[in-house]
Image (tube, rainbow, N blue to C red):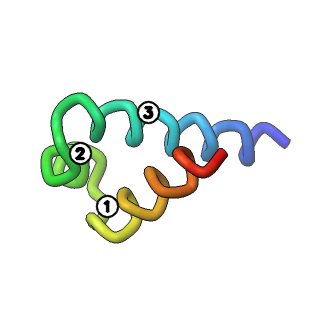
Amino acid sequence: MSIITEEMRFRQIICEYALKHGVTKATRRYHTNRQFVYRQLKNKVEM
């Protein structure tokens, strides 16, 4: 269970950073791609 919680926390941190600083900066800081960040933001808004 702790792995799932850790991953969910990581995704939440990325979303918060992206909303504050922009998606491109978030992708560079957290070493992921923009598609992933946009998908996470979309899922977060729908909830």
Task: Rate crowding at label 3 as few (under 14), some (14 to 19) or many (20 or more) other CA atoms within 10 Å.
Answer: few
- According to the image, label 3 marks what residue? 13
Q: Secondary structure at mark 1?
A: loop
The x and y percentages for residue 17 are 30, 33
Q: Earlier in the sequence, mark 3 or mark 2?
A: 3
User: As drawn, which residue projects farthest toward the front?
Assistant: 46
User: Which label was assigned to residue 26?
Assistant: 2
The x and y percentages for residue 8 are 63, 42
Q: Secondary structure at mark 2?
A: helix
Q: Earlier in the sequence, mark 3 or mark 1?
A: 3
| Amino acid carrying mark 3 in the image | Ile
Q: Is residue 2 left or right of residue 38?
A: right
Task: Rate crowding at label 2 as few (under 14), some (14 to 19) or many (20 or more) other CA atoms within 10 Å.
Answer: many
| Amino acid carrying mark 1 in the image | Thr
User: As drawn, which residue projects farthest toward the right?
Assistant: 1
The answer to whether the residues at label 2 and label 1 have Cβ atoms under 8 Å apart is yes
Q: Is residue 33 above or below residue 13?
A: below
In the rendered image, the quadrant that contains the C terminus is top right
In the rendered image, the quadrant that contains the N terminus is top right
Which residue: 40% across, 65% down?
36
The answer to whether the residues at label 3 and label 1 have Cβ atoms under 8 Å apart is no
Nearer-the-camera pick, 41 or 7:
41
Q: CA distance from mark 2 to mark 1?
A: 8 Å
